[in-house]
Amino acid sequence: MSLREDIQAIRDRDPAATSTFSALVNYPGLHALLWYRVAHRLHAAGLVFLARWISQTVRFWTGIEIHPGATIGQRLFIDHGMG
């Protein structure tokens, strides 16, 4: 999955996403998903503590927690992660 596909998923599902720049800047779900991918790779490599630390740090900043061991399908869109 690519960043381009992630942004397109946002633009397809949220009429408030008026541009690529808007999606990059204003969607904490996208930020959480991008960091999840980093944490997931670390988790798979056996660096579980570091992966969980990233997950918890991202949760603090975005309000969205995705366990680094989770399996996520394509074109996931998280809107309103805090409520």
Image: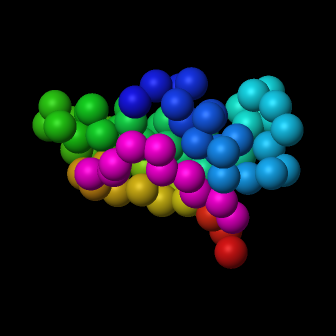
Colour pattern: rainbow
Counting every numbered tag in the picture gives: 0
Which residue: 58% across, 42% down? 9
Q: Quadrant of the N terminus?
A: top left
Between residue 20 and residue 25, name the one nearer to us.
Answer: 20
Q: Position of residue 52 (x, y in %)?
A: 34, 49
- Quarter assignment of residue 6: top right
Q: Does the image show residue 75?
A: yes
Question: Please, is residue 83 above or below residue 63 in the view?
Answer: below
Between residue 16 and residue 83, name the one nearer to us.
Answer: 16
Q: Position of residue 50 (x, y in %)?
A: 32, 39
Q: Does the image show residue 54?
A: no
Q: Quadrant of the C terminus?
A: bottom right
User: Which range is magenta?
Assistant: 71-80
Between residue 28 and residue 12, name the one nearer to us.
Answer: 12
Which residue: 61% across, 50% down? 29
Magenta stretch holds residue 16: no
Q: Position of residue 30 (x, y in %)?
A: 60, 42
Asked whether, in this view, residue 10 is left or right of residue 39, the answer is: right
Question: Please, is residue 54 above or below residue 60 in the view?
Answer: above
Asked whether, in this view, residue 15 is left or right of residue 68, the answer is: right
Asked whether, in this view, residue 48 is left or right of residue 10, the answer is: left
Magenta stretch holds residue 72: yes
Q: Position of residue 74 (x, y in %)?
A: 39, 43
Which residue: 27% across, 45% down? 49
